[in-house]
Image: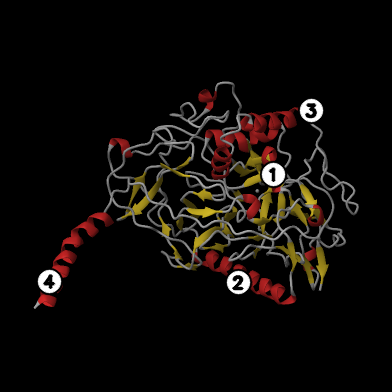
Amino acid sequence: MLNLLRTMRRSALSLALVPAIALWQTASATAQPTLPVPQKIPAVQAPGPVPDMPQTQDGIEVQQRGPVHEGFALPHDKNVAPAPVVPRKPPAPIPEEPPEQKPAAGNGQNVEWIPGYWAWDSERNDFLWVSGFWRVPPPGRKWVPGHWAQVDGGWQWVAGLWGEGNRPLQYLPQPPASVENGPSVPAPDDNSVYIPGAWQYQSDNYMWRPGYWYPAYSDWVWTPSYYSWTPNGCVYVNGYWDYPLVNRGTLFAPVYFNQPLWQTAGWAYRPWFAVDIGNWWGSLFIGPYRNSYFFGNYYAPFYARAGFWPWYSWGRNYYDPLFNHARWANRGNPNWYAGLRNTYWTQRSGNFARPGGLAGVNGIRTAANAPGLVRPLDQLNRSAALNRVSPTQLRQVQANTQRFRDLSQQRNRTELPGQRLGGPSASPRSGGPNVARQSGYSGLTINNGGRIQNNAAPFREQSNFRSSAPRGFQSPVIHNSSPAYRGSSHAMPSRSAPSFHSGASFHGGGGHGGGGGHGGGGHKH
């Protein structure tokens, strides 16, 4: 009898909890989500010796500036925008193999080879190869490579993304223009960073989840949620923790092929010239379409007119995950932001000696006025050891590369143009505060043979920050010389927001310039 009474009490308690659980599950989309707490980055081995650089090869020009591989770092654009249409069909992906050395990782980490891809060089009016690189993947994420899609008038790049495990990609209607303009309240303390708001798709409509402040971590960078454009709809990429750049792996420089070496039987490209990411902050830029970082010499006024923004100024005017983290990490340094700004303007004025990073290396010639950011792997400043790639590991890399390319082709077949979901854009529910405002900038277009047409809102530095900043920006809340990203947020309908995930399997409805030197890394088997 006593056991029966206990059972009845537990049943009554369970029934009483059902409404509470249902209420929690239908919490408002405006509620601040709790982000997962990242684990501490494990220690790595000390730097060790690296073999000498292999012989270079005619036909390969190592670029001392150019686009950063999107799998290494990607700027955050609060609005969805497709890449430009270019007039030429890209070549097939080239045979590419990793160098014979890879970064050593800490316990529990896995270093993967992420293959390269073709990117359009509007200055050269041709394609260059964005080299593959070694990467420690963000925890719980898998790389989903991009692809070139044939569309009316030419070819269009569909970006790769870090998918969430093996969850399928969800193709959604294009969200409205973002209403994110920064936080509406000051940071609760100096140990907080701002997480921007985002549209959440629910019941065939978009609801707004406002931004909020969240505790910062010295060894983790938060990548906010965003939507990745495809010809078949937009893919929602849920926010995730990523490593600081110096802990992500080894980034290799892009290259230009002035000969179709890939047509030679048994040939493969093996990159060797790496980018010194520890010293590139004064030479880091946001590209014209806001869908790629660029490094190197883009100081000339032409590039500002063409839509290139220096990283320090973009982060001050718009949200950027790397800038957001770096500003917080330098919150005790009152000269941090001023130093970045002075570096840019000193370089732009031409009063700073710009060493050529490839001068005198196996006959490599130096591009004019190129910062010394590209170095042979054996001369790179490293914080971790390099281990030799065994034959077994090389075969595994080759098999993974083929799987990546198969996945890219699968995306190309699935994301066919002309089968977009929900029309060109979905509208939020009616009501004054729900109306989305337009983006604060316009993108470039490519025409006239594929060259840049200067019709973008260019980068302009003004003495009064608020005169050039997006509407609603206010004074800084973090006490250093870098103005904090602030503004007014908006009250949105109180609706729950389901989690839409992305990954490496698929279902759905129907479906970048560079100057440089001479060098290479090609070889024959």
Q: Name the element at disc 4.
A: helix
Q: Name the element at disc 3.
A: loop
Q: Amino acid at mark 1?
A: Phe
Q: Are marks 2 and 4 in contact (CB under 8 Å)?
A: no
Q: Are marks 3 and 1 in contact (CB under 8 Å)?
A: no
Q: Amino acid at mark 2?
A: Arg
Q: Local crowd at mark 1 within 10 Å, few (<14), some, or many (≥20)?
A: many
Q: Which residue is mark 3?
A: 351
- Residue at horizontal 78%, vertical 29%? 350
Q: Quadrant of residue 133?
A: bottom right
Q: Name the element at disc 1.
A: strand
Estimate the spatial distance between the alpha carbons at disc 3 and disc 1, rounded to whole Å: 19 Å
Q: Which residue is mark 4?
A: 8
In the rendered image, residue 497, in percent from the top left (x then y), is placed at 33, 53
Q: Are marks 4 and 1 in contact (CB under 8 Å)?
A: no
Q: Which residue is mark 2?
A: 403
Of pointers 3 and 1, the one earlier in the residue sequence? 1
Which mark lies nearer to you, 3 or 4? Answer: 4
Estimate the spatial distance between the alpha carbons at disc 2 and disc 1, rounded to whole Å: 29 Å
Foreground pick, 99 / 83: 99
Q: Which residue is mark 1?
A: 295
Estimate the spatial distance between the alpha carbons at disc 2 and disc 4, rounded to whole Å: 55 Å
In the rendered image, residue 503, in percent from the top left (x then y), is placed at 49, 64
- On screen, residue 508 above or below 252: below
- Residue at horizontal 73%, vertical 29%? 346
Of pointers 2 and 4, the one earlier in the residue sequence? 4
